[in-house]
Image: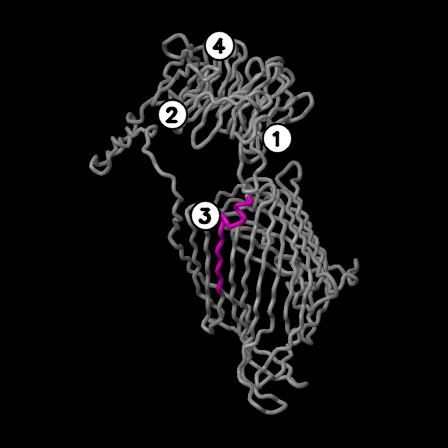
Amino acid sequence: MADVGFGNFHPVWSPVEDRFAYVSNKTSDYFGQSAIYIHDVAGGEETMVVPGVRSTLSWSPDGKKIAYSKYNDPSVYGHLYYDIYEYDLDTKEERRVTQGLRAYNPSYSPDGARIAFAYAKDGTVNVGTVDLDGHGFINLTGFANGEQVFSPRWSPQGDWLVFGYAPRLQRGIARCRPNGQEFQVLIANPNYDCRDASFTHDGMGIIYASDKTGIFNIYRHDIDHDGEDPQLTNVTGGAFMPMLRGENDLLYAAYTAAGYKIARLSDAAPREFPGSSYLPSRLYSSPIASADPGEWDWEGLNSFDDTELPEHKPALHERLFQSMMYFPTIRIDQFNPDNEGIEMLKPGVMLYSSDMLNRVEMMASGSINIKGERDLYFNITYRDKLPLFSTLGLYPDLSLEVFNVTRGTSSEIGISYDTVGVDVDFNLLAFSAKLGHNLFSNRMRLEFGYTHNRYTSTIGGFRNPATDNLVPATDNLYFVGNDLSAVFRYRNMVPTRDHEINPIGLRFSLFYDYEFNNFNPDGDYEVRNGMLTPIYTDFNFHRFDAHFMLAAQLPWWNHSLTMKLRGASILGDPVDDFFNYYAGGITGMQGYTYYALGGNELATGQLTYRFPLIPNMDLHLGHILFDKLYGGVFFDIGDAVMDPEQFSVSGLKKDIGFELRLESYSFSMYPTRIFFSGAYGLDEFTRTFQFADVTYGKEWRWYFGMLFGFDLSDGF
């Protein structure tokens, strides 16, 4: 009856028309992307009614409404809660019935006055009912020791509720009165599972799914008669979620090699199926060796009754940390052009640990070469209660970061209208603190931060050309930076199997910074008391940087069109190019080098068409599984200038390029994403750097990477 998609579930007949409702994921990649569909039996037409639903369904007695459960929008902490909703097929309006009950599997009473459902609290699931307005909540079953119930259904007369019941291991079937009285287990067996019960049309029996033969099939149970329950289906995959109309018109979810499909059996009468019995595994496999009884008290474990527990006093949990993990690293660093051979190699180590609840996370790394040039990093993130914030109901993440980078080079400095060559060692030290909290849902996030930078140059000793006196080696701060920042992020991406290699959805970020800096822009110094002292200039300004990405799925194939836009500006008069934005390189317009396009103002756009080349590779090479290969072609346009008035259509730079993306996994779990791209700058232009002209464009530039993700700008 319904075979599109691998997840088709919970069929339920309309009480007044020849149609049924069910949930299906159709062509989506995950079960969670299911929606409610109504299938017209006579014409075969289908209508999608409500998206984002994967629960059981229930028709109102007049056939005008459907009750279901679904996740509410994620909270600011990312929490998801099920609640009951009602959809009016005439008005096309959805109404929320319950509020924060963790309620699911709704079922209308025959008079349409109440809704029964299962709801979870403190590890236990009970049956409850509410009036249609969400009031009048009643806990019917009153379980409190980890019992689980599933999918309650009313009898046609409204005098009983039947539901799945699992006090410990196997699932059985139980019933109770609408007031919670006369609880009774109807079917229970420690050797097999019984589930998905619903009443027959006369209320005298139930139909259910069971794997008593080793395969789930549909059975009928007469409540007032003992004896073997007759079998209604005999499928080889599985039959679940049965729903009868009249005496014999059966709908169910059939498990097949292609997933779950909705099937119909219009004459579902009891039948004899010779040979449909369970074959114990001991007949065709060797028994598992028994453990030494002295090693463990198995009898005590098997007979343990978790409904009778000793009294425990509540106490704060101890923060338990995982063992520190060490990752040796080696880096080839070509940043310093003076380094050659072994000088470019930087061995190092990465360290990582977190507590068991991931509320405190620490990461550190360090590497150094034989010249002593080092890269150090430390980060700690705290995701637990913070004073003051928690009293306001806010639980932001607090992160602290420290960077330290050193490099050596040679340069010239200006002294008394002359220049002197010197050896210079640079030491960059940065500290940042950030507070981040989600807004309204986990799709939106706001972060506030403070960053302090101290850039020091150690200038080797030299003779002052004006006096011929020896000036000793001196450490000088040439930049002292302070940055107050705010970042707003919105991310609404479609979950698909290809969400990394071929993302679909929307991302937007807006960065605001207020910087107040002391900087020596011209490298000028003066000698004070025999010491070389930098001449500082204050640079205080506001800056904005906005990023936007929209990726749309194109029809008929798994291909997409992606648009990226970026605009950035330093407000006020132009400032020194030390503070420039840059539009080139691997994170921008790839047809030009990173520093080729720089300025106080920036505007870029990119259009990418991406398509599958080998969507299902399934190729193993050692510990790596190569999963899929995608190709893409892109076009970039944009520029970066010092003043907004310098922007012009004729001055915009353009490039074209291609990219190959290979999705793979190491050791079956670690993402290993490989990309290779090439870009050609369509425009040729010349920039002057340190009195030298450099020409860009009209050449191919190549990029290769192997990381956890493909998009290096994905963090925006």
Cα distance, mark 4 to mark 1?
33 Å
- Along the line of sight, the residue nearer the viewer: 671 or 417: 417
Q: Earlier in the sequence, mark 4 or mark 1?
A: 1
Report the residue marked by disc 3: 358
- Residue type at tag 2: Pro
On the image, the x and y values in percent for residue 591 come to 66, 59
Rounded to the nearest whole Å, what is the CA distance between mark 4 and mark 2? Answer: 25 Å
Q: Which mark is residue 51?
A: 1
Q: Nearer the viewer, residue 533 or 372?
A: 533
Q: Tag 2's secondary structure?
A: loop
Instruction: Let me know if residue 384 is in the magenta part.
Output: yes
Residue furthest to the left: 294
Q: Position of residue 625 (x, y in %)?
A: 47, 46
Which is nearer the N-term, disc 3 or disc 2? 2
Residue extending furthest toward the bottom: 468
Instruction: Write down the residue under mark 4.
Output: 203
Q: Amino acid at mark 4?
A: Gly
Which amino acid, mark 1?
Pro
* SS assignment at label 1: strand
The colour style of the image is one colour
Magenta part of the chain: 376-392
| Magenta stretch contains residue 100 | no
Q: Which residue is mark 2?
A: 167
Residue 108 versus residue 286: which sits nearer the camera? 108
Q: How many marks?
A: 4
